[in-house]
Each structure stands twice: as C-alpha cells, then as structure tokens.
Image (cartoon, grey):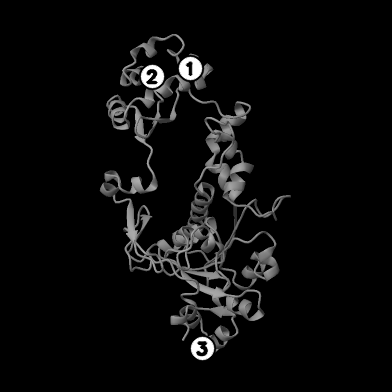
Amino acid sequence: MSQKGVFSGLKVIDLSGGVAGPLCAMMLAQHGANVIKVETPDGGDWSRILGKKYGDHTAYSVFATLGKRSVALDLKTEKGKAILWQLLKGADVFIEGFRPGTIQRLGFGSEAVRAREPQILYYSMSGFGQTGPLAERPAMDPILQAFTGIMNENRGEFDGHPHRVAVSMIDMFTGLLGFQAVAMTLIQQQGQSNRGGYLDLSLMHGASMLAATTMIGGYLEGGIAARSGYPNGVYNTSDGRIAFNMVRPKDWALFCDALERPDLAIDPRYMSAAEREKNLAAVADMLRPILAEKPTAWLMKRLTERGIMNTKVNSYTEFLEEEQVRATGVIAWLEQPGIPRKIPMANIPGLPPLESGTRRAHAPMLGEHTVEVLRENGFLQAEINTFLAQAIVAAPRATSA
C-alpha cells in the first residue's frame, strides 16, 4: 500500500452521526480518503455529547472522527443546502445516518443526489432499515441488543435477567461491515464508467451477522443456545477474579488437577460432559468456594501449565498496562485538543501506527475545517464571512477569519 493510502483522492461527504456510520467514514479516512464530516453548528454530531465531554469531544466522537475534516453547516437553511450541493460536486461517496425519510425531506435523498452527481456511491445507515414497520423508529446499540435476541443470551449468572453488553459492539461491527461494503464496491468499480450506486445497512442487519452462530444455535435448540458441559465463566478468587474456558474433552480432568482436587475428576456427578451439563449451575456452585480460596496468580499458572485458557479479569487501565499490549504495539497514545492527557487508541491493522500530530491521528473540533473546506470548494472569503455572520456555517474563532 502506498503511503497516501488506497483511497487517496477519494472525496467522501459524511452526514452520519453516532458510531456506526462515522466509523465507516473514519476507516475510509484512515485509508487516505478526503472525508468531510458535515455537522450541525448547534452541537455537531450527537456522539460529541455521549458521556463525559472534553472540549468538543467525548470518547465516542474522538474515535469516530479521526482523520476527518469537520464542517459545521446548518442544513435547515436554503443557503446551507446550497453549500452542501457545492461540497457534493465531484464527490465519490455520500454517507448519511438519519432516520428514514429525514434526509429525503432535507432534499438529499439518494435519487436527488445521484440525479445531480451520478458517480456518487450513496450509503444509508439506520437502526432498523429503510423499509418495514419499524423503519422510522429511532434505535441505538442497546435497543438492537434487545430486539435481536443478543440481550436475551447475556443473562446474569445470579439474577437470570437479560443484560446489555456494555460495549457498543453492534455499532462497531456494523461500522466495519459498512466500510467493507463501501470499500469493496469502490474497488469493484475501479476503471468503470458506470460508477456509483446505493448501499443500505442497518444496525439490525449488523447485529444479525454479529450474533450469527448463537442465533442459529438458539433457533435450532428452541430458545437460548445450549451451553457446553463445562462451568466456564468468571469466578472470584482470594484476591480478584479469574475467567477460564474449557473446550477439550480432557480439560475437565486437567482442571481438577490444577485445583488439586483430583476427586472431582472421578466423581460420577461430574465425570462426563453430559452429566455436568444436566446441572451446570450446581457444578459452578460447587466450584465457587474452592476457587475463592486460591490466589489469582496461582490459578493462572496452574491452568496455563495444563493448556486451559484463562486470564485475570482486568479493568481497561490494567489491560493497557499489560506487557503483552506493549510488546505487540496494539495501542497508540495520542494527544488531542481539549483532552488533558494522551489517550489510548487501537492501531488499525494493515496501516502504520497512529502518531500524534498527523492527519490520521487528529480528531477535529466542531467546524475546525469549515473555512478551509469552503475555500477549497470555490467559495470566496467574503462569502464565507457572510455565512459565518448569518450562522449558516460555524468555525472555531481561530479559524474563522
């Protein structure tokens, strides 16, 4: 891959918000595309208010805006719409994440955009899809976890209650699926005169792919997918918590040996996977006091020596301090405006490590590039000053002159 990236020269207009749509556009930017993120002057992309704010950013918006340029533009005004049409001239990709019907009411539906700019690959991101009875309902990751059955699979060990997985996994996975779909379409169309098209992806679709194996198992088994005959999970130790996972037929005997309880390996109630599976909760109850007496490091050493997958349960901070993380270079530490200290950011496979001070590693402030982008797209400074005065566009004070 060249230093400029495989999508160098590609122009992307990103109107999406949140995580999934912006993640797709961020990945295009990381691969060299000129991604112009169009945001409302009144607060910007709503990911900028998710969680604790650091200047113009939250943890969500920092990640999803890396490598982009931000333009703050009021699309509720006719002049704002005219500016967007100017930005769309010669663009290759248009990404939107409004509820179905909203972008059409603004005048930028796929048919309208591709009538004027037929070369554009138009990508729509939504919660439930563009059609069907739920199309116009708002939805975020937790709602789709519940709707698609994922939450039902994630039941509390003690309360049996469905719980949300506390990571925006559907958003993240769907964003990567979107990038895959857009990237493969662009590559397929290279050198063709008949470029452009329409792509539609929803969080519902992404969740369906994310949960494919458990969804198949749950459907075939008439409910929640069957568990294995092993008491896998998270257990308290004398000084923390440990997680382990057994899959091989020989693992139970090795596990019992690691605990210095060989009697459990020959106990007829636990000897076979079939017997354990009959009452897995009782097996886990039996193990809890045994494991609670042992130090985490002692258990990890003995389980590892016997080839049984295990780890202590880390916080994010503890994970970042692990020697394995440093040895593999998975994490880059980046400086960002408005954030008081360097932040951890996972490097992107196949690309050079992220470095502070580079375009790829910079998360823009709201409207940071408004003036720059408008100039590039044919607007005179006098016009831009008028737009700023009329609040049609916005820019940080230092860049508005």
Q: Is residue 187 left or right of residue 144?
A: left
Residue 1 appearing in the image: no
Taking the spot 37% from the left edge, 56% from the top edge, the residue there is 345
Circles 1 and 2 in contact, beta carbons < 8 Å: yes
The percent position of residue 349, horizontal first and vertical second, equals 36, 52
Instruction: Tell me the CA gap for discs 3 and 2.
Output: 73 Å
| Marked residue nearer the N-terminal end (1 or 3) | 1
Q: Which residue is mark 3?
A: 380
Dot 2, how many residues are within 10 Å of its Cα: few (below 14), some (14-19), or many (20+)?
many
Which kind of residue does numbered mark 2 sit on? Trp
Label 3: state its secondary structure: loop
| Marked residue nearer the N-terminal end (3 or 2) | 2
Q: Quadrant of residue 159?
A: top right
Q: Which residue is mark 1?
A: 276
Circles 3 and 2 in contact, beta carbons < 8 Å: no
Question: The N terminus appears in which quarter of the rendering?
Answer: bottom left
